[in-house]
Amino acid sequence: MHFCIVCIFVTPSDPSVSLRERKKRATRDALATAALRMAAERGLDQVTVEAVTAEVGVSVRTFFNYFGHLEDAILVAAPDSTARTCRAIVGAPPERSTLSVLREAIAEELTHIEDGHDRWELQCTVLGNSPSLFPRFLAARGADEQALIAAVAERLDVDARTDLRPRLLVHTALAAVRSAVELWTATGRTRPLRALHDEAFAELAAVAGALRD
Amino acid sequence: MHFCIVCIFVTPSDPSVSLRERKKRATRDALATAALRMAAERGLDQVTVEAVTAEVGVSVRTFFNYFGHLEDAILVAAPDSTARTCRAIVGAPPERSTLSVLREAIAEELTHIEDGHDRWELQCTVLGNSPSLFPRFLAARGADEQALIAAVAERLDVDARTDLRPRLLVHTALAAVRSAVELWTATGRTRPLRALHDEAFAELAAVAGALRD
DNA sequence: GTCCGTTTTGCAGACCATGCATTTTTGCAT
DNA sequence: ATGCAAAAATGCATGGTCTGCAAAACGGAC
């Protein structure tokens, strides 16, 4: 996990990364971008791997060297988001409550989302029009969850395989986030996502406090 | 329906449902059962639709009349579980905290799970051996979530589309449940699931209380 | 028995996904 | 720059998934 964080911000002109690596990423990114754009334009079921590769200019077989499924190409996430969050979690002051560390690390990412850069925006469109994508979408998020759990376990210095807390903390934080994002989209994005996010965590504190019947 | 294999599953003593309907259910159930069992025995990637239909004694095309994907047949859930939980939520005394109502309604279902008869047990096996199934599995659970949210909204007498609380409550409760189940499976099911479940909710109260930094 | 609506079925066809052998591209040392 | 080895891209063959369509089988009611 550590080395990935470093390698993520490479630009195509970065000489520290080999040409081979840069080309690979370019191809991968071109495939993902083309797949996502085509799915947003004409609908998921009107997109074939062949069409995507034709646009990018590689063979169909090459596509499957990069992605196991067409849907995987559409749903690739901004790769730095999770890594950034993990760093924030591990690096936060130990005396702070882990849950509020999570709250703020994620809030930081939400502002990026709300700025609404292309990829997220397009993915929302595609997901809205093609609910059959949801399974894999959730799975992609599941991978993020595992990374976050590992980060929290590192922060708490416990074993994620045997200790309940890392899982619980991450799942709980994501419960609040999920609630906020769902309501945000359900209400046509009228209220600021950040406000909903804070409200969800405030509500979480209130609700969980009343847990003892 | 020429094959006796199918007819075995038909309970002839229920006249309240037409023969046609009973046969349909029997076929559907036979397909789902066969698919799940075969996946548990030989692994998901060694199961083909053709093999499943051959065992049941119907055509491949018929399979796809019932299920959109092979995986759907494997992951069909016990249909009454969610409905039972929703009823418990709506029917619980209004003065109790909703989160503890959720905790206990779900705990009730977990005992059914832990009794672990066939279907759940087999599904756990298959999921453990074939992580690629997880996407659809999570999606199936997502449908359950919506039902629970609706039930909580009814209990609270609020609109689930504009009020944050139903979503937050359900997602939070499921965060605890998910943590418990994950740890349960990760530790080889040594500790009782119920105990992990209670521990997760207790921990939830503790960490959420410390949310104000 | 006959008729109507439903279910099942076979078939054709498009697409997905993987393995393997071959060719092309890249990195690197000379 | 040149040659060689590793990595990547490609073509091809194969087997599986899933859909639409029209014909046949079936269930239920008259």
Image: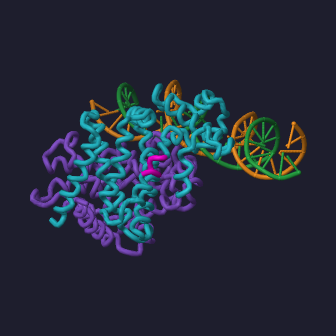
Chain colours: A cyan, B purple, C green, D orange
Residue that extends furthest to the bottom in the rendered view of this protein = B190
Decide if residue A93 is on the left or right side of residue A161: left
Horizontal and vertical percent position of residue B122: 45, 62
Residue displayed at 20% across by 49% down: B165
Residue B134 shown in magenta: no
Span colored in magenta: A80-84
Q: Is residue B74 visible?
A: no
* Numbered label tally: 0
| The image quarter in which residue A24 lies | top right
Q: Is residue B53 visible?
A: yes
Decide if residue A56 is on the left or right side of residue A87: right
Reply above or below: B125 against A16. Answer: below
Horizontal and vertical percent position of residue B183: 40, 67
Quadrant, the C terminus of chain A: bottom left
Q: Nearer the viewer, residue A129 or A18?
A: A18
Residue A82 shown in magenta: yes
Decide if residue A149 is on the left or right side of residue B90: right
Q: Nearer the viewer, residue B128 or A154?
A: A154
Q: Nearer the viewer, residue C6 or A76?
A: A76
